[in-house]
Each structure stands twice: as structure tokens, then as C-alpha cells.
Amino acid sequence: METNTEKIDRYLLNEMGPEEKAGFEKELANDPALKKEFIIQKDLTQQLQRMGLKGEIAQKIRHIRLIKTLSWISVIIAVALILGVSVFLWMDKKEVADITHFETVEVSLPVTKVQINSESDTILETPGGMMLAIPAGAFDTESKSIEIQIQEALTDLDIVKSGLSTTSNGELLQSAGMFSVRAFDGEKELYWKKEVSILVPTEEVNPNMMLFDSEVLEDGTINWVNPLRINEDLPSIPMAQLDFYPEHFILTLKDMGENITDKGYTDSIYYSFSGYQVPRIDDLFNRLEPSIQIITESKTVSNSLFQFASMLVQADTAAAAESVHSEIFEIDPSRIKAFWNEEFDNTLLATKAFEERMRYIHSTCESKYLLAYLNHLDWQMWEIDSLCMQLAKGNQKEKFREYYLRKEGGVRISSELQQKLLAQYESKQKAWKEATEKTWQAHYRELDSLQNVAMEKRLAFSVKDAIREVQVFNDELCRNMKDAYRQIGGVAYCNEPLPEYYTLEVSTPGWKNLDQYVFAATVNRESMTYTDPVYGKTATLTYSPVEFVVNEEDSFDRVMLYLLPDSLSSFQRVLKKEGAWKEKLNANLNYRFVVIAYKGEDFYWQKINKLDPQTYTLNLEKGDEKELEKYMKRKAKGKKEDMQ
């Protein structure tokens, strides 16, 4: 009679037919002991794979079958000793998890469904701006055509409407977005065999973010578990797609009416400044004040000092004179020309991270920082940031400290599929830029008529923001975007690409959450003492009860209550406990509150801008989801201002 060990071996070696394979997978789902043995045996197989023994795995497993005198535990211990170094080196690497059943939860968000060829590498873009790189053979299926289903909650509004929350075992999380990716062959959900690379857009990368997996609780809600650090390696981008000019250089040329679309031409202008001799310091002050010649949007005269700016007033020249020190500062264009070429592709310099640092280094006019990066291409980015901290003083030291705290790593050699993913991302950025420029040109005539609108908003929005609110502008921008994107072979969604993104490797289906811990809390949310892990400061956390009564609660199909801590992208859902809506407020946080409910398709809601520990009676009013959207946008704007 065949043993479980032999069955597992044949399954791992793909020696089972379709019917037997399906039956074995059903056994795995229902037999905890078999599942445990399967995981142990599969782990052994994976350790052999890591050692480069792919061609010998079958022989190794079959050899293990001959060991009759040892228990399986003894075999695993023996092999673990042999593979000890390999296990240590790979212990932090994410694996494609052993999934024998699928936990699902109903989330009220649109589902994007896309048919793909399972035998080919595929790049997908979502309505929310995510991009997925799915390798050939990523899913366990013999079907060529399969369906990918994606849900995403990347905005505050999406998270609240979906009923999702940002807590992990009682601890508050700050979210950068949530998403779910699943694969189907007809009605059958598929197992994952390979990792899928995913880019999640963001306005600014937070180095403390982690990727959480979802755990469906008995009440149908999600608890976020198993946090993993995000890969800190830096993706390499072709040098030709990066911008190392001084900050206002291109804008200055545009104001002067020059052709800024021809990089060869703009390079020639920039590099023509190379080698210009700045006068001696003892003579510079006299020449700087009052006769300094500046390149501005209206004139191109220059003499002793070059500064690229889109707008400049007399006060700026006085400030420039006051800032002269007793040494010469320069970032000569020849220094930039030396590395801004394809020879430096796939190096630390060919990254968005260095592009950002170079923009700041230009503003310092100190070449010692540039040389620190050029001379240490084999270092991690954070190590060079630390070196620059030691070279710097004052505000410059603080800026490089900011970079250092991101703990960004080195450059990984991207696979062909990852290169395709980055190319798709860059194409989207380019298409959006072309579409917006084309649309603005057609709508500049509306500027004058909308000046009053902008003034009435007390400068809260620029004139361009006012134009954006005109539906005809948005419609035309969307058409231009689709046209530009169609030309590069993609399907366009009319959402502006954000400047940064998180690069994730996902190996299991279902909901994932990009989060960081705000601070530790107990599951019961009791008062406690908390020590900040970064700065070592200690604070006392005090919790006070708050309770809500929803009038006519039984008349609604769905009711969702949320605590919204100010200054944080956190969404703490209030759950009904023992027949009452109860939660505890952290005294160190200020909370807003929102409750939303549905009767069929009708939307009801109520908001409270400042929450106190007391009992609230809620009288929900019928409204429009757009009102909630505006409220969440105002909260997000206030959060950014509070954090600055």
C-alpha cells in the first residue's frame, strides 16, 4: 500500500494524473496531518532547489524513499544539518506559500477582470494605477486562457466604502493601500506557483511600510498578519530616462521659447556652461552686487554666476550676495556629462533615488557629495547617505539624514520581465505628460475667465486647479490620454500616475495591505506605556471608551462605522460587540468619525469632526457618495499639512 510519503513524492514530481492530483489536493485540504507532512516534505524539496540541484531533485527525493530505518523527523534533521548554510542565507526570502484552500471575504469594491495567456509573461495595469508583472506559468493550471481578478482600495474613500480596516491583532496601522489579486480557470480558483511583481503607486515612499497578508476572522472581517519588509533594493532605470539637470533648467529654457523636447539640444546648452571660471572670492562680492546677471524667464544675459530660475526678484540677488562663503562652490556640467550615459545603466546612479539626490546636490553647489556617490557605486545607497551626513553641516546634514533613514539598498539586476514592467511604467508617465501638455495648450484661453474663481477660493486652488474642475477639460484630457497611451500599445485609465511606487513580490492570492505600525497597542486597547523603537522616547497611552447608537439601524442593509485618526492614513472600523457599537479612543490622538450605510443602492451617512469619549446617537441622512468623497479628500489634505 502506498504511504503518504510516496504520495507526496509523486505529487511533487508531477507524476499524478489530473484526477488523482485533484483528489490528493482535496485530501490536503481536509487532513491536517497530511498537510503538515506535505509542508515538511515540500520544504525539503525547496531547499534542494535553492542549492542549484534542480536537475537532481527527483533523484534526491527517490533516494530519501530508500531510508526506511529513520523516522521522517530524523531525515529532516539530517538534511537540515547538510543544508544549514543554505537555509541561513535564504531564511528572509519569501516563498510561494503552500495554499490548500482559499479564504475569501466579500468586499464592496469593483472587480477588474482580465483574460491572460498563462503561458506568456504578462504586464497588467489597473484602474487605480497598479502594475502587475505576471510570469509565464505563475499559476497551477493546464489551461492556456485564465482570468485574473483584481480589487484595489488605494484611496481613503475606497477603504471606507469597502468596509476594510487597518488594524493588526488590535494594533493600529497606517495604510498606503490595499489590494487583492486572484486567478481563476473558469469557476476554479488557481494555486500560485511563482511570485508576481506588483508596483503600487504612491506620492512618497515610506521606508517603514510592510506588506501584510489577510486573515479572515469568524465575523467576516480581515485581520492583517504576517508583515514582511518590502524589498529595499533599488530598481534600475535606463540613464536616458532620468533627469539630472539643475532643478529649474528645463523650465528656464521653456520660458525662453527654446525647444525642450530635443534632449540633444538641451544637453548641448547645459554642457556649454562647463568649465566657466567663477571669479576669485575676494572679487566675487563686488561683482555680485549690484550687477549680478541672472538667466531668467525674460533674458539670457550671463557673466559671473549662473542660476536657473523660473522667477527671480531683487531680494533674491541680495540673498545671493549675502550667501557667498570663502570657498568656490560648483557642480560643473562636465561632472554630470561624465556619468549621464548608457555606460552607467544598471548602477546605483541609474535610479530614481539618485535622481532625487542629484537634484538636491545641485542646490548645494558642493561637488563633494556627488563624488561620494560616484566613488562608491558598490555601496548601499544608505551607506553613502551616511557618508554625506558626515561631510555635511546644518540643514544639509539633516537632508542627508532624511535620505539615510530610508535605508534604501543597492541595485538589483532586473529580470527581463521586471524590465518590461518598468518600461510600461515609464511609458505611462510619458503618455500622461504628453496628454496634459496637449490639453493645457487648448485650454489656456480659459485662464482669464477663471481668475475670479481662483480668487474666490482664496488661493486654495491655483487657476489650473479651477480649470481641472471643468468637466470639458477632464473629458478632453481623458481622450488625449487614451490616444497617447494607445500609441504605446496599452489600455489607458484616466488616472494621473503618481511619482513613486512600492515594488512588491506577492506569492499568495487574496487581500494584501501596505502598512506600518503606528505604535503598539494591546488587543483589548487598555492603557499602557509605549517606547518609540526609533527615537527611544517613552509615552503613556491612555484609552477612553466611546459608544454609538444608530437610530433605525435595522432599516439599513449595511452599516459601517469608522474612527479616523487625524494626521494618519488609518481607518479603524468600529465593530458591534455584545449588541453595541463600542470602541476605545487613544488620548494621544484626535479622531474624526464617519458612519455610512446603504438601503439597496441608496446611500446614508453622518460625520463627526472631533470625537470625544462619550455616547453618540447617530441620525443618518440620505446623501450622495460624492459628499463622502469630498470629505475624505479634505481629511487627506489636512493629514498632509499636519505631517509637514
Image: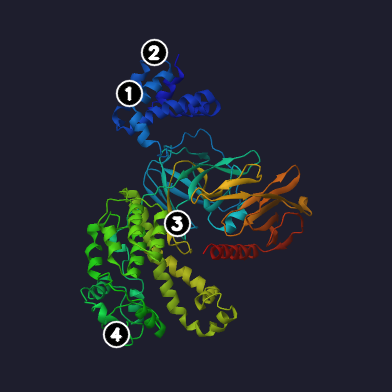
As helix, strand or loop, the secondary structure at mark 3 comes to loop
**Given the image, on which type of amino acid does mark 2 rest?**
Lys
How far apart are the alpha carbons under marks 4 and 3?
45 Å
Query: Which mark identifies residue 348?
Result: none
Residue displayed at 33% across by 19% down: 63
Q: Quadrant of the N terminus?
A: top left
Query: Which mark identifies residue 68?
Result: 2
Find residue 222 and report its horizontal and vertical position in percent. 59, 44
- In the image, which is nearer the foreground, mark 2 or mark 4? 4
Q: Is residue 601 above or below residue 270?
A: above
Colour pattern of the rendering:
rainbow
Query: Which mark identifies residue 60?
Result: 1
How far apart are the alpha carbons under marks 1 and 4?
81 Å
Of callouts 1 and 3, which one flags the residue occurring earlier in the amino acid sequence? Answer: 1
Find residue 277 and report its horizontal and vertical position in percent. 21, 77
Of callouts 2 and 3, which one flags the residue occurring earlier in the amino acid sequence? Answer: 2
How far apart are the alpha carbons under marks 2 and 4?
93 Å
Q: Nearer the viewer, residue 317 or 325?
A: 325
- In the image, which is nearer the foreground, mark 1 or mark 3? 3
Q: Which residue is mark 3?
A: 205
Circle 2 crowding by C-alpha within 10 Å: few under 14, some 14–19, many from 20: few
As helix, strand or loop, the secondary structure at mark 2 comes to loop
Residue displayed at 41% across by 61% down: 398
The quadrant where residue 41 appears: top left
As helix, strand or loop, the secondary structure at mark 4 comes to helix
Q: Are marks 2 and 4 in contact (CB under 8 Å)?
A: no
Q: Is residue 315 above or below residue 71?
A: below
Q: Residue furthest right?
A: 552
Q: Is residue 65 above or below residue 503?
A: above
Q: Which residue is mark 4?
A: 286
